[in-house]
Image: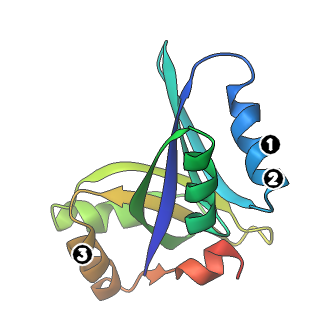
Amino acid sequence: MKLQQISVFIENQSGRLYDVTNLLGKSGINIRALSLADTSDFGILRLIVNNPEEAYKILKDNEFTVGRTEVVAVEIKDEPGGLAEILGALSKNEINVEYMYAFVEPEGKRAIMIFRFDETEKAVEKLLEAGFTLIPGAKIYGI
């Protein structure tokens, strides 16, 4: 029920984001979801891709600072209060969200939230107990 996320540390300067995405694209790696956070000096590009192992290797081989992290994809209702519902279940179980990002399914009936938790195993257990649908990696990766 967990996904591999690739985190790339890039300098906060023109062209560096292009360098990463161009390299991945030319290598046949499809970006399925992403988040970019920045400071004045660098950015952290978080990616869910169709082939995380290959993406990691390609980026490392091209001298990018890259890491791998386990995250969880959860389906939520794409309606007002959908996010609050899942955050309420997490809060009730004292599970901390370190960060999250989302994308909406094309049909617009549900959203997929990507979560990084401080206690991933506990979060997975409690979300399943609460009746939430966790999306397996193969489905997100597009395999």
Say which of 91 and 112 sits in front: 112
Q: Does 51 sit left or right of 64 as displayed?
A: right
Residue 114 visible from this viewpoint: yes
Q: Could you tell me residue 90's position as x and y percent? A: 27, 64
Quarter of the image for residue 50 reads: bottom right
Quarter that holds the C terminus? bottom right
Instruction: Report the Cα–Cα distance between label 1 and label 2.
Output: 5 Å
Q: Which mark is residue 124?
A: none
Tell me the crowding category of disc 3: few under 14, some 14 to 19, or many 20 or more residues within 10 angstroms, Cα based. few
Judging by the rendered image, the residue that carries numbered circle 3 is: 121
Q: Could you tell me residue 111's position as x and y percent? A: 61, 65
Q: Could you tell me residue 48's position as x and y percent? A: 59, 60
Check whether the beta carbons of the residues at disc 1 and disc 2 lie within 8 A of each other: yes
Tell me the crowding category of disc 1: few under 14, some 14 to 19, or many 20 or more residues within 10 angstroms, Cα based. few
Vertical position of residue 98 compared to residue 14: above or below:
below
Task: Count the numbered circles shown.
Answer: 3
Q: Residue at x 69, y 32 (%)?
A: 17
Vertical position of residue 100 compared to residue 104: above or below:
above
Amino acid under disc 2: Gly
Which of marks 3 and 1 precedes in the sequence?
1
Q: Does 36 sit left or right of 117 as displayed?
A: right
Instruction: Report the Cα–Cα distance between label 1 and label 3.
Output: 34 Å
Instruction: Report the Cα–Cα distance between label 3 and label 2.
Output: 33 Å
Camera-side mark, 1 or 3:
1
Judging by the rendered image, the residue that carries numbered circle 2 is: 25
> Farthest residue in the left direction?
94
Q: Which mark is residue 22?
A: 1
Tell me the crowding category of disc 2: few under 14, some 14 to 19, or many 20 or more residues within 10 angstroms, Cα based. few
> Farthest residue in the right direction?
26
